[in-house]
Image (cartoon, grey):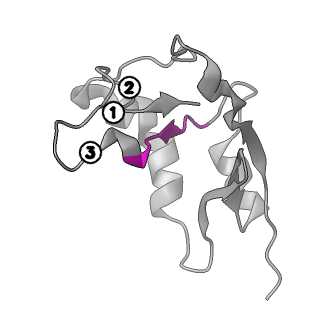
Amino acid sequence: MKYLFILIIVNIFTFSINAQNTYDIKEVSPASIQQKCGECLSVVNSLPPEVTYGFLLEGRDIYFAMTDETYFNLLFKKPNDGIAVDVVTKSQFPCNSENQLTNSTFFMGNLL
């Protein structure tokens, strides 16, 4: 079976930046999730089992891959639509001490 992979590259080089950029992500209250995210959630919930998506890590690059271009285009309709990736590292979860998570409502590690 031939898969069509749509790839969005995110360069992990941004880990070297000290200040976290929230990329203009706005907090959504639980009451407004359906209004703000309803269309996207509807697409994700309607995906047939043969359509898969996920993230791939290759070296210092992260790719978003989806096996169907039609559903990809339903998720990303507008020019500013995108995905935020929250990368947490193993070192943030030490065995003998408190977890080292970022104090943010948007991310726990490094937001890309």
Q: Which numbered disc, 3 or 2, marks the residue that appears first in the sequence?
A: 3
Which quadrant would the C terminus be assigned to in this image? top right
Which quadrant would the N terminus be assigned to in this image? bottom right
Per the image, label 2 sits on a secondary structure element best described as: loop
Q: Which numbered disc, 2 or 1, marks the residue that appears first in the sequence?
A: 1
Q: Nearer the viewer, mark 1 or mark 3?
A: 3
How many angstroms separate mark 2 from mark 1 (CA)?
Answer: 15 Å
Q: Nearer the viewer, mark 2 or mark 1?
A: 2
Question: Residue 76: x, y in percent?
Answer: 68, 41
Q: Which residues are magenta?
A: 83-90
Question: Mark 1 — residue?
Answer: 33
Residue at 55% over, 75% down: 48
Question: Mark 2 — residue?
Answer: 106
Instruction: Give the main secondary structure of the magenta stretch.
Output: loop
Residue in front for this viewpoint, 41 or 18? 18
Residue at 51% over, 29% down: 111
Q: Check residue 94 in the rendering and tell me which mark sits there, or answer none.
A: 3
Relative to 26, say whether 96 is above or below.
below
Q: Residue furthest bottom?
A: 1
Amino acid at dot 1? Ile
Question: Residue 61: x, y in percent?
Answer: 73, 46
Question: Residue 67: x, y in percent?
Answer: 72, 68
Q: Nearer the viewer, mark 3 or mark 2?
A: 3
In screen coordinates, is 16 left or right of 1?
Answer: left
Quadrant position of residue 34: top left
Residue in front for this viewpoint, 102 or 24? 102
Q: Residues within 10 Å of mark 2 (few under 14, many from 20)?
A: some
Residue in front for this viewpoint, 68 or 96? 96
How many angstroms separate mark 3 from mark 2 (CA)?
Answer: 22 Å
Quadrant position of residue 54: bottom right
Total count of labels:
3
Relative to 82, say whether 75 is above or below.
below
